[in-house]
Image (tube, rainbow, N blue to C red):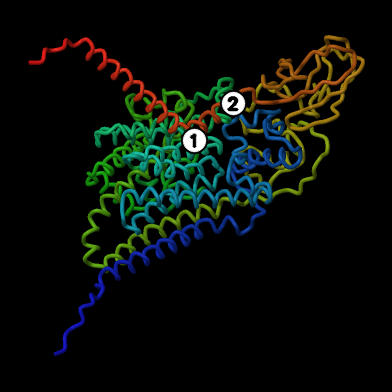
Amino acid sequence: MLTRPTERIPPLLPSLRALATAGGVVVAAAMLVLASSRVVAPLFDNVSLQGIHDWDSSAAMRYITVLSLKTFHELPWYNPYLCGGFPAWPYSDATPNLVSIFLPFYLTMPILTALRAEILGNLVISLLGAYAVAARYTTSIALRALVATMYTLNGRWALQTATGHAWHLQYALAPVALFFFDVACDRGRSKWALGGGIAIAMMVYQGGLYPVPHTALLLGCMAFLKAVLDRSARPLIALSIAGASAIGLSGPKLLPMIELMTRYPRIIESNEVIGIDQLTAMLTSPAQSVRQGAAPVPAYGWHEWGMYIGWPMLLAMGLALMFARRARDNAARIVGLLFFVLSLGAFSKYAPWTILHKVPVFASQHVPSRFMYLGFLPLTLAFAGWFGGVLEHPIARRLLLHILVWIPVWYCVMDVASVSRITMEQAFGLKMPAVAWHPVFKHVVWPAYNYEPRGAWAGPSLPAMMSNEGFLGCYSVPDRAEPHGAVATSAPGYRGEVHFEDDSGTATIVHWSPNRAEVEYAGATPGAILVYNMNYDPNWRADGRPSFEHQHAVATRVTASRGTVEFRYFPRMLPWGLLFFGTTVALALWGGRLLRFWQIAIRRASHIVQSFGREGATKAQPQMPVC
């Protein structure tokens, strides 16, 4: 009699599910690559062209790193090329490529090519970070890809990138910080918060003037809400670890930056207000680019307000606000709503932005529409978490839905990519002049070279630096470093790059670099004032002693009739910042061991005390007679 084989045949459904998952990964990767390529391709049509608006200033802030390292073989502490001289390392926007994974590109590529490499690199970081944090909210590959591409490539990113707001690129690290924070909220994973601290510290080093406080606010609100909703202190512990490590690891940049900001406080009014109609146009009108706005805006141009995401994504955010009820989704939707209300501006004396603008750091910011970009992330995460939960069981039973979900996702992504591409086509269109390097540095009122056509907001700062000229009329640093101590060579009051105030002797610079000027002098009266034609900053020293300010320039007194004086710039808060950094690294590496050591020591000490207490109680207890 024949019998059927007893071997168990693997069911077909799990195989189809695995195949659908693998196919989803392939489709997601293809969509990410295709959408990104569509948006950034115009940047590489002609890599010899400079960007419009603020790209000259952003390039100049990066080129001082290249010049200092490659030409003068020193670190970029000071920038003599902007506005008569201004601190480089202590300035938040300056030298953002020194402590950066993109430094090798700047040291090996032409500056304009390296700018494009940095844009592309941050785009990749943003996509991967947003995808990773989306994976914490949903198992749907399609929804993860939707969150990643919509956050990274929306119209706001394109407008800010096209106009040279290079600091906006640092929002790429915000989802990375959020990912590590979210993992650290799980039981037994507090150490993951260090990753969030590293991400924020890198934002500080790379000039994230707005992204840093906005990301800190995002994590703070998320931690508070998660602690309340989950009834757990773990989110607050994770926030503390991330915040402390971010401050400590960024100390070498942060402390000099704070010291500089105390001398150049940036308190700016921000009374801008936008209405619901304007907000709707910003988010849904495809007729927007650098040259075209979709609605009237309060100030500063459309690039500061637009953020095209399309009607489907606006509907998705509305659904998230109404239906996302899980604890994780609920925290995200509340924070996202808060950020969007902040973006409406000072519509009331009790408006969130009116109140927040009184807080230090935020008091130096304006254009509250910048909150929209980061607020979009938690709202899309809340949507992905809710909608992914709705689809989970139907997709498990009907595998055809795996394919059908991709249709609206693909449409939304490609629609946004098409609008962003139009903006990026207008980004880089200035022809660089042919520049010759002058062996002797000098200050000029206006550089001899300019772009064609003249489209740089801050003027031709980069061509001036490439010709070894200091551009006094620049618009690249706080308050334009006024009042200037440096005098242009063509100005009536020019007396040389170094001179004696009483004309008692002669002085000549024999060695010069951005951080240093070695001066030989003769025929001077002891005690005479020697003036270096550079804006004064208290971090300048002369022969190791503090210099002083003379008519806003750097000066010192000579002690002999002839000799040598070395003026040198070094950020005096840097050693303290390095101490902060080293302490933080040590605590991160050995803090857990130290904590366990003290816990064991305390436990053993308590056992010893308790044992002595028990022995004493035993001796003091009266002995009962034995019957």
Contact? badges 2 and 1 (CB < 8 Å) = no
Closest to the observer, 218 or 350 = 218
Task: Tell me: residue 361, above or below residue 68.
Answer: above
State the quadrant of the N terminus.
bottom left
Q: Position of residue 100 (x, y in %)?
A: 58, 42
Q: Where is residue 51 in the image (x, y as percent from the top left)?
A: 61, 48
Quickly name the residue at label 1. Answer: 589
The answer to whether residue 291 is visible is no
State the quadrant of the C terminus.
top left
Q: In whole angstroms, how far apart are the C-alphas of marks 2 and 1?
A: 25 Å
Pair 2/1: label in front: 1
Closest to the observer, 22 or 210 = 22
Badge 1: residue crowd in 10 Å (few <14, some 14–19, many ≥20): few
Q: Position of residue 483 (x, y in %)?
A: 67, 21
| In the image: residue 483, left or right of residue 531 | left
Q: Which mark is on residue 108?
A: none
Q: Which mark is on residue 256?
A: 2
Residue at image location 24% in from the left, 36% down from the top: 229
Residue at image location 26% in from the left, 12% down from the top: 616
The amino acid beneath tag 1 is Leu
Badge 2: residue crowd in 10 Å (few <14, some 14–19, many ≥20): many
